[in-house]
Amino acid sequence: MAFINYSSREIQLKIVYYGAAMCGKTTNLVTLHKLITNAQKGELVSLATDADRTLFFDFLSLNTKTLPGFTTRFQLYTVPGQPIYNTTRQLVLKGVDGIVFVVDSHWDKMAENVESFNNLRDNLAENHLSLAQIPYVLQYNKRDMPNAAPLNYLEFTFNNRATKVMTFEAVAAKGDGVLETLNAAARLLLAKYSKTPNPNVAGVAARSA
Ligand SMILES: Nc1nc2c(ncn2[C@@H]2O[C@H](COP(=O)(O)OP(=O)(O)OP(=O)(O)O)[C@@H](O)[C@H]2O)c(=O)[nH]1
Ligand SMILES: [Mg+2]
């Protein structure tokens, strides 16, 4: 839930990257940490095993001046995708404001992607929430894979609600589509928490080369 501090004029918004194991959630945060200006970002905290699998979560805090008079702090979290860590996923989802659901484009991962999407719905329900209330975007990651599923198949499978959500193709390992995905999620949240229905702001800026 958004935390608004009127005395320090700060808004905190929590965005959770959710998706199947190895779909690229941590890679999104690692890439964002490289791309974003130093002034805007905090440390990237990763609680991972030796094999770089997320054990608890990754965390990255970003500051932006997007709403007049307020500093907005986006707190980005990833969940561990491995099925055994479901209790952790439920904990990380507590107080969520927005979600980036990362889909692994690899054909062989479709069943795991669907299972993860269903698991997201179940865990939101545990927190008395639903995808109808929480703004979310879809990221179709690993578009560089030779056996990536076609976009229309992914749309049919994951973006089949009456109101379509925004989707982004990405190659997170190379940085493609990563900032676009985050900015879209950030804009959705800012639109929800500001009086302007569609604020013309960029959530976060890339570091100039
Ligand atoms: N080819 C390709 N590989 C990628 C891409 N994004 C991530 N990867 C690789 O996929 C593997 C898993 O990435 P992670 O970011 O650790 O996946 P995760 O979703 O955080 O996994 P868990 O923490 O286990 O849930 C790593 O070897 C990444 O380098 C991509 O766009 N293309
Ligand atoms: Mg991870």
Image (cartoon, rainbow, N blue to C red):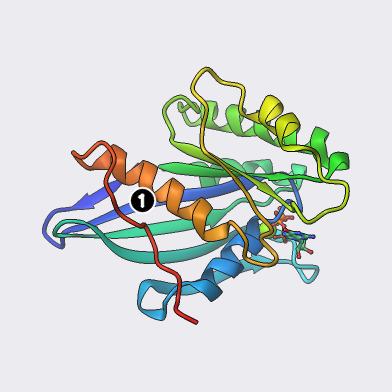
Q: Quadrant of ligand 2?
A: bottom right
Badge 1, how many Cα within 10 Å: few under 14, some, many 20+?
A: many
Q: Is residue 153 left or right of residue 108?
A: left
Instruction: Examine the rendering and report whether any part of residue 88 can be seen.
Output: no
Question: Where in the figure is residue 193, as x and y percent of width and height?
Answer: 26, 41
Q: Residue at x 16, y 59 (%)?
A: 9
Q: Residue at x 31, y 54 (%)?
A: 12
Q: How many marks?
A: 1
Q: Is residue 188 left or right of residue 70?
A: right
Q: Nearer the viewer, residue 196 or 17?
A: 196
Image quadrant assignment for residue 140: top right
Instruction: Examine the rendering and report whether any part of residue 148 can be seen.
Output: yes
* Up/down of 137 relative to 180, above or below: above
Q: Residue at x 40, y 42 (%)?
A: 97
Q: Nearer the viewer, residue 208 or 194?
A: 208
Numbered disc 1: secondary structure: strand
* Up/down of 15 relative to 157, above or below: below
Question: Where in the figure is residue 90, as x and y percent of width and height?
Answer: 57, 40
Judged from this view, the residue extending furthest toward the left is 7
| Mark 1 close to ligand 2, CB under 8 Å | no
Question: Where in the figure is residue 3, as x and y percent of width and height?
Answer: 28, 49
Judged from this view, the residue extending furthest toward the top is 162
Quadrant where the N terminus sits is: top left
Q: Is residue 19 left or right of residue 52?
A: left
The residue carrying mark 1 is 13
Q: Residue at x 63, y 42 (%)?
A: 87
Q: Nearer the viewer, residue 129 or 197?
A: 197
* Up/down of 115 relative to 181, above or below: above
Dot 1 amino acid type:
Leu
